[in-house]
Image (cartoon, rainbow, N blue to C red):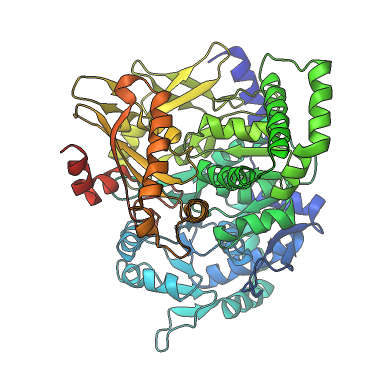
Amino acid sequence: MSTDTLAIRAEIEQEIAGLTLPAALARTVETEGERPAYSDKVGIDLSAGYAPGWRTVGWAALRERSLDLAGALIAAGVRPGDRVALMASNRIEHVVADLGAVHAGAVSMSVYNTLSPEQVAYVAGHAEPTVAVLENADHLARWERGLGATDSLRTVVLIDAEPPAGDDRFVGWDAFLTAGAAWRTEHTAELDARIDAIAPDDPLTILYTSGTTGNPKGVVLTHHAVLYECACSLRVAAPTQHNDFISYLPFAHIAERTLGMYIPQVNGAHIHLIADPALLLGALGEVHPTRFFGVPRVWEKIKTGISAKLAAETDPEKRAQVERALAVGLEYVEALQHGGAVSPELEARYRAADAGLLSFLRALLGLDRCEWSASAAAPMPLEVARFFAGLGMRIYDVYGMTETCAAVTSCGPDQFRLGTVGRALPGIEIALADDGEILARGPVVSKGYYRQPEATAALIDADGWVHTGDIGELDEDGFLKVVDRKKEMIITSSGKNIAPSNIENHLKESPIVGHALVFGEGRPYVVAMLTLDAEIASLVATQLGIPTGTSLAELAQHPAMLTVAQQAVDSANERLSRPEQVKAWELLPVEWTAESEELTPTLKLKRRVVHAKYADVLERLYA
């Protein structure tokens, strides 16, 4: 470890010495108590679109509700270290339930809403929660098998659903919270003692990874690890104002949990909770956040929508004006990269382009106030990053995993390079193994997988290095580039090593391509399966003269749409080496979603699932 890394780590360790999340929240309430903490749209009729109006709770009131919930949990028999499972959308009650569990000395577990009943039963049987907090009837149905998978569950709290008759394990949210408030009035000292007994190295949460292969594994994260992550992330992100943030990814996702739950408890912010990601664009237009995080698929969807509208412009002069402005924006952002400098001449041209058009385009997206925008969870296609650079936006790529409390490297205002995921966060070490695997070490590292010592030993070696499973490259300035997943690298029958995500990102640059999977393991050449982006495909179909109302399955077989898909493949192949080029492909008549199991809840491909589900397609492509 370098002297600088050691010194910075010591500084941060001093900042958070002895701190737990309840203590951090209490400090924030002292300074931010009357400021808004969380807002949501629960109970508002959204049938006519993204209606105005929010439920809002301030920081002081949020803590009070959380203490009531903690009291209810303790009265229900929750002991220190017990697990409390949560399945709910992004809403105020989800945050209150999580904080209530933490203040009761328990370990919170947000579970993905999209898990199948079988997967829920596995998690319930493995984690053995004492209490489950569920939002609605759908979640209750998903937990039906889970409720029988363990004897540990004594209480099930239902936020919106009606408690089933004849089973005293079930209780409604309002009744549970009211009982907790009554318990607190008589047991204040007991609750205070429970909070005071929480130690920095105690587990804070267990997050069951979404699992691209096999059963999910429960990642144990401590108060200390999470608070270190918050502190070093804030150093790189360098917020300059009280922030407005939109939370729309599941709280079972470590990035959303860190950005939408943990960091705000440390420094205060106003978080707008979006229950349905489909409402994200409307929320952006209403909130105009100062900070925004999106997985690559979200940025791709935004880019595709803008590109489709720009392409529809029939006035050649207006199109040329937009293209000139985007070119200046890209030149400006590229000059801001590490080691670069913006000349006075470029500064003037950018200010003119920004005042004339770029700021207007960002405002249309709701990103005009955004001082920090980021991407993680999968490689960001370079062309997508360059597109937003054209709008004058730096998308700060971040790299990490649940097992490291989210980020271990990041771009930021003072460390930015396109095509990379930044440099190591303060006090964190990054290295490459002999085979190129990315290794990480530092205070953010998980204690390991819950009740899985063999998997933990495979994750963290004797020297404390986390083996990420990703292949990377480090440049001379310490900027990391992620090549692909180690286990997903393709080795063709001729021995060529190929990174499939690179090819897939080129294919997805076509507006009509929703998802792409490249295959070629042990085969003589590379093939691809493509799916349509339903929204954009319908717009393109109209431009091609295909009748309105044509189904997605019919579009996937239409000659005009197949021609557009072929153009996407040809365009990708022009930028690839010969072994990487796609020799055969098929446009599938379906969409891939988390519900249909081809994607994880964070929209990453489940390659093995796709390989098995579409084995017949792969065979046809090699016929």
Looking at this rendering, what residue extends furthest in the bottom direction? 166
Q: How many marks?
A: 0
Looking at this rendering, what residue extends furthest in the top direction? 476
Left/right placement of residue 346 relative to residue 415 reads right
| Residue found 72% across the figure and 36% down from its top | 317
Asked which quadrant contains residue 192, the reply is bottom right
Does the image show residue 394? no
Question: Looking at the image, is 321 positioned above or below residue 548?
Answer: above
Question: Looking at the image, is 594 positioned above or below residue 70?
Answer: above
Q: Name the spot of residue 346 as percent of width and height, x first.
A: 78, 20
| Residue found 78% across the figure and 40% down from its top | 359
Does the image show residue 561? yes
Left/right placement of residue 187 relative to residue 524 reads right
Q: In what quadrant of the picture does the C terminus appear?
A: top left
Given residues 69 and 327, the one toward you in this image is 327
Q: Name the spot of residue 603 as percent of width and height, x first.
A: 44, 48
Given residues 463 and 589, the one toward you in this image is 589
| Residue found 54% across the figure and 72% down from its top | 75
Left/right placement of residue 44 relative to residue 249 reads right
Q: Name the spot of residue 43 as percent of width and height, x first.
A: 64, 75
Asked which quadrant contains residue 189, the reply is bottom right
Q: Name the spot of residue 509 as percent of width and height, x first.
A: 49, 37
Given residues 331 and 288, the one toward you in this image is 331
Given residues 209 and 287, the one toward you in this image is 287
